[in-house]
Image (cartoon, grey):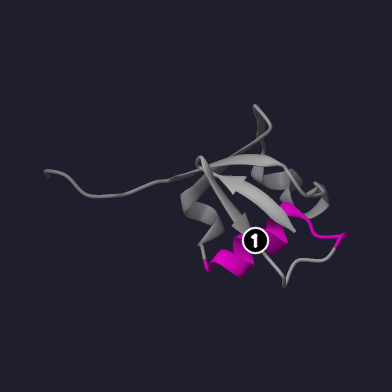
Amino acid sequence: MQLVINGQRREFTELTASAKISDLITTLGLKNDRVAIEQNGEIVPRSFWAETPLQSGDKLEIVHFVGGGRR
């Protein structure tokens, strides 16, 4: 499956035609409580990741939340 993630085209041979956004998060090794996902211009709520299908050619923006700062 070919996806465009944050502007870069990537090939994922481990994702099948029935892959969901949650499968991509697992494949990328991301912690699902620290990212936000936009698929083809639409924000996908975390509660829908397990049921939202991926299609070859999808454009995804993945934003990582980083903690820290002053106390």
The N terminus, quarter of image = bottom right
Q: Quarter-wise, where is residue 39 in the image?
A: top right
Judging from the image, what secondary structure is the residue with disc 1 in? strand
Disc 1 marks which residue? 11
Q: Is residue 11 magenta?
A: no
In the image, what residue occupies the spot 67% across and 65% down? 12
Residue found at the very far bottom of the displayed protein: 14
Q: Is residue 4 above or below residue 32?
A: above
Residue found at the very far left of the displayed protein: 70
- Look at label 1 and name its amino acid: Glu
- Residue 19 location (% of width, % of height): 80, 60
Q: Which one is in front, 29 or 14? A: 14
Residue found at the very far top of the displayed protein: 41
**Magenta-colored span:** 17-29
In the image, what residue occupies the spot 12% across and 45% down? 71
In the image, what residue occupies the spot 11% across and 43% down? 70
